[in-house]
Image (tube, rainbow, N blue to C red):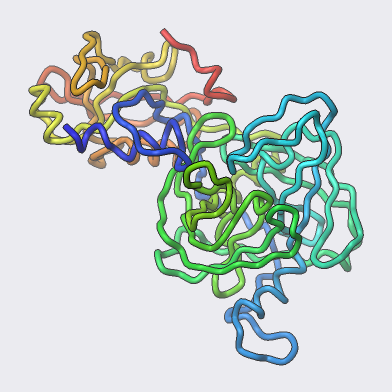
């Protein structure tokens, strides 16, 4: 039972990786981004690999990448109205009291002036200014669109072509634990700061600004802090693998403790494509709450299946409810945790077995609204296959209807 109530899925979906792991929880499968794995090209001039040294050629890889990529990193100032209520950013730092200027980072992705940053950097801004590389010149930037579900925003910077030095984008699906990485950004307003480290873990989940979950996140021990938001996490070839977005902090500290998270660049590719084509981003939506079924939990609840996802509730009017997926109908408490018994147990998605909620989430992430998903469920000891037509997820977790 302890394994069940300490499921990592709990912290992943509701609290994100910036909060501790907790017990039985209500989550929403599909209340997360559909990164789609899009392959749309954003830049046309990739960097060479390995990065060639500019200057003395001292063999310092971090120095070489910094010289090359630093030109395309942006220092972003977002001006907000006076009187706005400060909100807690994913980095755990409050926005300025009574409006003011929030700072963050970003990076160029083409020679047309397009800059990627975090949604939370420019959210609510009335005016956005950008400085590029080591230049002290400030340029006006237009927010083309934002996607709070993935914490990605796209800007258009009005700068001369000679000042535009785009970074190349890697394939983040090929990132491996232990890969060397560097981060360039503006922590605490200290512009053009570089730090280095490794990829500490992959396939993490963190909470997005709109309360949903971001999947396939890269964890790094490269020092990132408030102000690094939106800046690039770069591999040893000089290509961007992720967008630095959040950190885990210890105690009351708001600074770096060696645990940072970057939204994968493959996710950003698809977001940028949709923002450029449609001006908005739509994500797939399933609409259930539940938790991981383990052998210990199955034994305690006398369920024949030993692994899968125990459906706690289905969201009222959601795709799962319309397809006939059933949630629990009897409240129960085990070791102080409350949930409902009697719901379906999801054992496979599109024919692939699932052992926990993260796998269901990943399947929904890879889909698009309108697609059909086949769920294999155990109901009262009998196996059923139910086709669910995925819907369009609400803009915010607060908009999800409850029973």
Relative vertical location of residue 179 with respect to residue 212 in this rendering, above or below: below
**Which residue is drawn at the image coordinates 48% and 36% (left, top)?**
213
x, y percentage for residue 238? 61, 72
Residue 278 in sight here: no
x, y percentage for residue 22? 34, 33
Q: Closer to the camera, 115 or 382?
A: 115
Relative vertical location of residue 242 with respect to residue 285 in this rendering, above or below: below
**Which residue is drawn at the image coordinates 56% and 61% (left, top)?**
223
Is residue 15 shown left or right of residue 340?
Answer: right
Q: Quadrant of the C terminus?
A: top left
Is residue 217 shown left or right of residue 101?
Answer: left
**Which residue is drawn at the image coordinates 48% and 28% (left, top)?**
370
Residue 105 in sight here: yes
Q: Closer to the camera, 301 or 285?
A: 301
Relative vertical location of residue 13 with respect to residue 324 in this rendering, above or below: below
x, y percentage for residue 311? 28, 22
**Which residue is drawn at the image coordinates 69% and 43% (left, top)?**
153
């Amino acid at each position: 039972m302890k394994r069940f109530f300490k499921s990592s899925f709990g912290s992943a979906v509701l609290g994100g990786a910036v909060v501790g792991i907790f017990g039985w929880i209500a989550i929403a499968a599909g209340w997360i981004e559909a990164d789609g794995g899009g392959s749309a090209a954003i830049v046309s001039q990739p960097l060479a690999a390995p990065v060639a040294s500019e200057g003395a050629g001292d063999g310092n890889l971090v120095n070489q990448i910094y010289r090359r990529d630093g030109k395309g990193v942006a220092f972003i100032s977002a001006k907000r109205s006076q009187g706005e209520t400060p909100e807690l950013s994913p980095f755990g730092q409050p926005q300025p009291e009574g409006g003011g200027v929030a700072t963050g980072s970003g990076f160029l992705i083409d020679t047309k002036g397009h800059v990627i940053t975090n949604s939370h950097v420019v959210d609510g801004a009335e005016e956005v200014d950008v400085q590029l590389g080591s230049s002290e010149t400030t340029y006006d930037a237009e927010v083309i669109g934002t996607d709070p579900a993935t914490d990605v925003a796209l800007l258009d910077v009005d700068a001369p072509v000679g000042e535009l030095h785009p970074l190349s984008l890697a394939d983040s699906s090929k990132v491996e634990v232990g890969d060397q990485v560097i981060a360039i950004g503006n922590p605490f307003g200290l512009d053009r700061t570089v730090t280095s480290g490794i990829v500490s873990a992959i396939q993490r989940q963190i909470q997005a600004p709109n309360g949903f979950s971001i999947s396939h996140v890269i964890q790094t021990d490269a020092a990132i802090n408030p102000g690094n938001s939106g800046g690039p996490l770069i591999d040893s070839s000089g290509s961007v693998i992720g967008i630095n977005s959040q950190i885990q902090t210890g105690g009351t500290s708001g600074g770096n403790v060696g645990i940072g998270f970057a939204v994968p660049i493959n996710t950003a590719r698809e977001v940028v494509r949709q923002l450029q084509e449609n001006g908005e981003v739509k994500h797939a939506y399933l609409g259930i709450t539940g938790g991981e079924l383990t052998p210990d939990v199955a034994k305690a609840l006398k369920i024949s299946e030993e692994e899968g996802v125990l459906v706690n509730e289905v969201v009222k009017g959601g795709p799962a409810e319309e397809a006939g997926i059933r949630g629990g109908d009897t409240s129960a408490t085990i070791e102080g945790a409350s949930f409902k018994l009697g719901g379906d147990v999801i054992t496979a998605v599109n024919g692939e077995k699932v052992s926990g909620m993260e796998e269901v989430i990943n399947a929904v992430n890879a889909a698009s609204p309108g697609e059909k998903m086949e769920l294999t469920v155990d109901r009262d000891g009998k196996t059923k296959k139910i086709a669910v037509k995925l819907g369009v997820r609400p803009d915010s977790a607060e908009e999800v209807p409850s029973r």
